[in-house]
Image: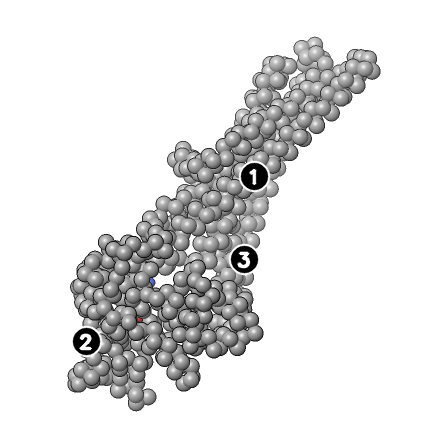
Amino acid sequence: MQYFDLKQFKKGVSLRTLKKTLRLYKYVRPYWPEFSVGMLFLFISSLAGLAFPKLLGELVDSSAKGHLMQDISRLGWLLVGVLVAQSVFSYFRIVLFVNVTEKTLAILRQTIYNHLIKLPMRFFVGRRVGELGSRISSDISMLQETFTTTIAEFIRQIIVIIGGVALLLHTSAKLTVFMLAIFPVVMLIAYFFGRYIRKFSKQVQTQVAEANTIVEETLQGILNVKAFANEFFEMNRYRQKTLQAASTGMRSGKYRGAFSSFMILGIFGAMVAVIWRGALLIATGEMQSTGELFSFIIYSGFIGGSVTGLAEVYTSIQRSMGATENLLEILDEPAEPITDSAQLSPEHYLSGQIAFDNVSFHYPSREDVRVLTDVSFTIAADQQVALVGPSGAGKSTIVSLLLRLYDPVEGAITYDGRDGVRLPLSALRAQMAVVPQDVFLFGGNIRENIGYGKPGSSEEAIIEAARKANAWEFIQRFPDGLDTIVGERGIQLSGGQRQRIAIARAVLRDPRILILDEATSALDSESERLVQDALEKLMEGRTSIVIAHRLSTVRKADKIIVLDKGQIVEEGTHQELMEMHGGLYKNLSEMQFTH
Ligand SMILES: Nc1ncnc2c1ncn2[C@@H]1O[C@H](COP(=O)(O)OP(=O)(O)OP(=O)(O)O)[C@@H](O)[C@H]1O
């Protein structure tokens, strides 16, 4: 998927994009009654607005023709009445439209997020997630503007143009024809001019988004920026991006300025021509009164304003179509078939037996690089298996395949003899737990972070899990206990503490299959002992697969699988592998112990 396509943008409002955009209609449909009433109000207030110049013209005439004071007051009050009606209807129209928009956008936001979170891993790798997030939110605000203002403006302007022209024709067909002969030309030029300008605004948007990505990424990874003393490097990168956006913006500003001058000259020039012509018509008696010319001019002004407004509305509609298209593209990405894992049916219970059957794999983003070749192994239920091998051998990839974050390109992975592809994804993942290398803690408190293993767990269950994970002791020492805020906004836990929180999460989940990615960074020996002890308890009575970086920790494993360059090169217990002369495992382990 290409998330942003400039070429697409240049095409403008085509029938195809319009059709696509109409798919959004389904999100507005539930609020159709409110929307219709809003529309009705919009009609009424726009029509009331149209009556305004006519009444003004009559008011001008009535004084000129020496009407009675009473008549003049009647007209004056009528005008006030029209104004009041217009403002009341406008108020309710806006309130209704905003209500519909807010409700629609909430649903749309949820739909997109619900879909996004279900997308497969391959969607997220190779994409800057920060950029994705900010683009989605800016696309949605674009739609917000469209629903609340743009659509209403569009309709109001159309009413003003059609109604205004009809009224003008009624006053003086000759003058109207004269005016209309000038206007379409101006409109047409404005249309093409506007289209050209839009190219720039999209470019600016993209460049600003790129600059924002730098901010987001560097703030998220501020530790790295500081550790590498790269502040100046980042400042420079950001400066370049913002300057680039500014220079495109300024270039676009020149065109926009020219556009606006053109509109002033075009529209007001046309108006001067009309007044000129109108004055001549009055002189020859073809037009009745100054009042008529007066309202004619105001109508022409209204129409002129609406024509200019229409060009703006057009830009805005086009932009929101681009936004809609981007959003729909996300919705069109096929999601993983994820169901609520809380409802696990007994037929999907796993005993924990796993087999890789001639599995070959390459990542979707790098089809030319084969990461696993013909990998076959079996793991019996409740066995403890260690994956070892040099960096880049494919250990983490095996784990990703086990979790079905990706599917094998060739071969199959079976769980209890059943092909993983046939098992419901959520049922499979619900019975696994991962204790990762870099433990990610959410911004909430410790309770929430442990509870993530099994949402809805009781306080007792969480405490029990923390105890088993050897974490309760340090949690208790915090003044706020389980309520201690951790992660970005809270206290920073040590590596060993984070690991134990992750273990507690896994204990709570009580999975059939446990996956441990051993931390590469060495913990101090006390932490190490606590973590190791907790892990051993956790591994009991379930299938466990450990990605081992330190070979000292895998001696007790039932089976050690040694990988190299995506292939299994050795397999056996520690004892068996140590007896293989010139074997990779023996080599690796001798290297580690002599250092
Ligand atoms: N998302 C990805 N897209 C493309 N290639 C990837 C991706 N993840 C890993 N690779 C590549 O796949 C190969 C195996 O990587 P993997 O992470 O499985 O190795 P590993 O044995 O776990 O290494 P380490 O011990 O360093 O974690 C590497 O060459 C790596 O560059």
Q: Is residue 171 above or below residue 87?
A: above
Q: Is residue 376 left or right of residue 136?
A: left
Q: Is residue 581 above or below residue 53?
A: below
Which quarter of the rendering shows the C terminus? Answer: bottom left
Q: Is residue 97 above or below residue 2?
A: above
Q: Position of residue 559 (x, y in %)?
A: 22, 76
Looking at this rendering, what residue extends furthest in the front direction?
460
| Residue at screen point 70% across, 27% down | 83
Q: Which residue is label 1 attached to?
A: 99
CB under 8 Å between discs 1 and 3 = no
Residue type indicated by callout 2: Glu
Q: CA distance from mark 3 to mark 2?
A: 55 Å
| Residue at screen point 67% across, 10% down | 286
Circle 3: element type? helix
Residue type indicated by callout 1: Asn
Q: Which residue is label 2 attached to?
A: 571
Circle 2: element type? strand
Dot 2 crowding, Cα within 10 Å, few <14, some 14–19, many 20+: some
Q: Residue 65 occupies which quadrant of the picture?
A: top right
Q: Nearer the viewer, residue 574 or 70?
A: 574
Marks 1 and 3, the one that precedes in the sequence = 1
Residue type indicated by callout 3: Thr
Q: Position of residue 473 (x, y in %)?
A: 47, 78
Q: Does residue 536 appear anywhere in the picture?
A: yes
| Residue at screen point 31% across, 69% down | 515
Q: Is residue 320 left or right of residue 588?
A: right
| Residue at screen point 30% across, 83% down | 552
Marks 3 and 2, the one that precedes in the sequence = 3
Dot 1 crowding, Cα within 10 Å, few <14, some 14–19, many 20+: some
**Which numbered circle lies on residue 242?**
3
Circle 1: element type? helix
